Image (cartoon, grey):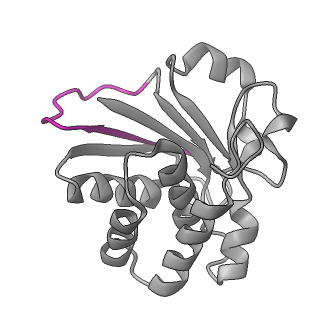
Amino acid sequence: MVEIKFCGRGGQGIVIAAQILARAYFLMGGYAQCYALFGGERRGAPVTSFLRVDDKKIYLKCEIKRPDRLIYFAPDLIDENDIESTLRPGGFVLINTPFGPDRFDLPVSVVHASSIAEKAGIGRAINTTMLGSYCRVAGDIPIDVLLEAIRVSVPGKIEENMKSALRGYTMTMTPEGNAS
């Protein structure tokens, strides 16, 4: 089982990101379970979304405390001490940031999703851009499967979202400083 935690702010598409990624794993024959934690606050408030995926049915219903993969849509929410204490060994961290991976004390992959999404015409919702980057780093979902999940899951600006996902896929930088 792979457990994924998404951290961001309202309006960035955190909840929908987990749903799209769940659909992508489902399209590949897997099982998925996603849920979110957020208050009744407005746009910009912290939001956390979770996703479990496996090749067999998932019966576990508890909060994900030690994820295999951490995805930060909002870099201001990062607590590197928290990452070190919660990320499972062998896991990875993906961050939306204009800075390179060497800017962080931990090995992380980065993509400037905010800029990519803006240029693609989808504005503040960076979910599809981050998912394209996720596909590149994780390596367990082919980009064409993600694009199909986007096509059937996103209600508007489908072409723009698919373009943004592809750009996120190609523009991801790894801890070594190279595109993944």
Does the magenta-highlighted stretch encompass residue 103?
Answer: no
Name the residue: 64% across, 23% down.
Answer: 83
> 159 or 44: which is nearer to us?
159
> 135 or 85: which is nearer to us?
135
Query: Horizontal placement of 170 versus 135: left or right?
Result: right
Name the residue: 72% across, 80% down.
Answer: 119
Residue 115: give x, y in percent of width and height: 76, 69
| Quadrant into which the N terminus falls | top left
Query: Horizontal placement of 99 versus 48: left or right?
Result: right
Residue 110: give x, y in percent of width and height: 70, 47
Residue 128: give x, y in percent of width and height: 52, 66
> 131 or 171: which is nearer to us?
171
Does the magenta-highlighted stretch encompass residue 49?
Answer: yes
The answer to whether residue 50 is above or below residue 59 is below
Q: Quadrant of residue 44?
A: bottom right
The answer to whether residue 79 is above or below residue 180 is above
Q: Quadrant of residue 43?
A: bottom right
Residue 57: give x, y in percent of width and height: 13, 36
Q: Is residue 50 visible?
A: yes
Disc count in the image?
0
Name the residue: 37% across, 61% down.
Answer: 20
What is the span of residues highlighted in magenta in the rendered image?
46-64
Q: Is residue 40 visible?
A: no
Q: Work out which residue is located at the far left of the displayed protein and give it.
A: 57
Name the residue: 49% across, 37% down.
Answer: 5
